[in-house]
Each structure stands twice: as C-alpha cells, then as structure tokens.
Image (cartoon, rainbow, N blue to C red):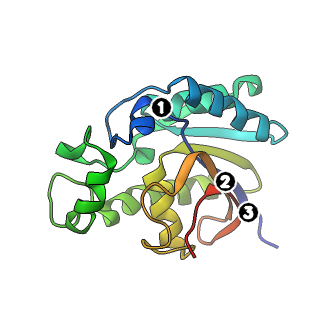
Amino acid sequence: MKNYCTVYLTRHGETEWNSKGIVQGHSDIPLNKIGEEQARELGKKLKDINFEAIFSSDLMRAKRTAEIAILEKKLSVKTTVALRERYFGKHEGKHFSFLHQVEIKLESENSIETDEQLVDRFIPFIREVAIDYQGKNILIVTHGGIIRWFLIYLGFANAKTLPPGSIDNTAYVKIFSDGVDFIIKETFGIRKKI
C-alpha cells in the first residue's frame, strides 16, 4: 500500500461579503463573527487529527480561519499565494449573481484568472505538499473557487453539477495523495447537484 499524505482541503469561514453575495477574489476581506464561529466549529471537528503542517492562502479570511481552527495545536500557519481565490479583476466587489452572467466570458477576458490558470497555480502546490508530507496529515485552508475547480479537475463533478456557490464556508474535502494520484475519501459541506 502506498504511503499517502492525508490532506484536509478546507474553505475559509464566512465574511461580510460572503453573507451579502459579493465576489471577493483577491480582495482581502476579514471573517465576520459567523465566520469566526465557523472556524471554531471546524477546529472542534478536526481536534483529534494530528496535523504535521497547516497551509493557508495569504488572504486574511483563510489565514484567520486556519489560526482559529488550530488554536490548540500550537502550529504556525504557512501562507502562500498559490492558495488564493481566483482573481476577478474589475468584477471583485460586485454581486455574485453577476458572476453567473460572466462565467462563459471568463476565458476571454484578460482581467479574470481563467479556470486553467487557477488549476495550474494550485496543482503543483498540492502535489509538492503530498510528496513532502507522505504518511502525514495536512490542513490546507483556501477558497471555494480553488476547491470547486480542483474537484472538477479530479472528475468528482463538472461545472454544472458543482456550480459557483456550492462549496459552503468551512466545507472540506479529505484527500489521500502520493503527489501523483488523488483519492477523495470524504466531503463535508460540498453541495453537488445530481
């Protein structure tokens, strides 16, 4: 049997912009009180897991979620831009309903990071982590768009069965990986349409 890294890939807690349906992208929006409570609840769910390392997007909503969730574990959070949400350019700060109208145009508009760019930024990172931490448990706190497109990349769903907004705040995916293969073992808070 392979010596897999166990990755808990988690979305950050709620922000005011989440609660209002506003696209955040790279905008650095803090957690609201509900988001902080969600992070505490995430910590309770994961309390019995011995994490070797914690990685987070460098955006404060993800970093703070990680810090709250692992408060009792005395581990530091390693941040990276590889875990950032998709860059939406001039569309950041607009209502989420607008996103459905422009999703088809994402590929052609230079100011928005494409699906391929998003996956190409994330995949090398998670492969490296899985190789470096074989046999260990890792927590990664990132954003809904990263998790959504990674699941689509893995064949868990397609863009129609996993539409924008289908990854709840503090949702997670438990994945086994050796850096080559990715095996989805468990999901929580992922709303896949059938």
Q: Position of residue 60 (x, y in %)?
A: 45, 28
Q: Tell me: residue 85, above or below residue 41.
A: below
- Crowding around mark 1 (Cα neighbors within 10 Å: few <14, some 14 to 19, many 20+) is many
The answer for how far apart the CA atoms under marks 1 and 3 are is 29 Å
Q: Quadrant of the N terminus?
A: bottom right
Question: Which of the two marks, 1 or 3, is nearer to us in this view?
Answer: 1
Residue at horizontal 56 percent and vertical 30 percent from the top = 35
Question: Which of the two marks, 3 or 2, is nearer to us in this view?
Answer: 2
Q: Tell me: residue 193, above or below residue 9.
A: below
- Label 3: element kind: loop
Q: Is residue 83 left or right of residue 5?
A: left
The answer for how far apart the CA atoms under marks 2 and 1 are is 20 Å
Mark seen at residue 4:
3
Name the image quarter holding residue 113: bottom left
Mark seen at residue 7:
2
Q: Type of residue at label 2?
A: Val
Q: Type of residue at label 3?
A: Tyr
Identify the residue position indicated by label 1 in the image.
61
Q: Type of residue at label 1?
A: Arg
Q: Tell me: residue 81, above or below residue 178.
A: above
Looking at the image, is mark 1 or mark 3 earlier in the sequence? Answer: 3
Name the foreground residue: 107 vs 55. Answer: 107
Name the image quarter holding residue 118: bottom left
| Residue 46 visible within the image | no
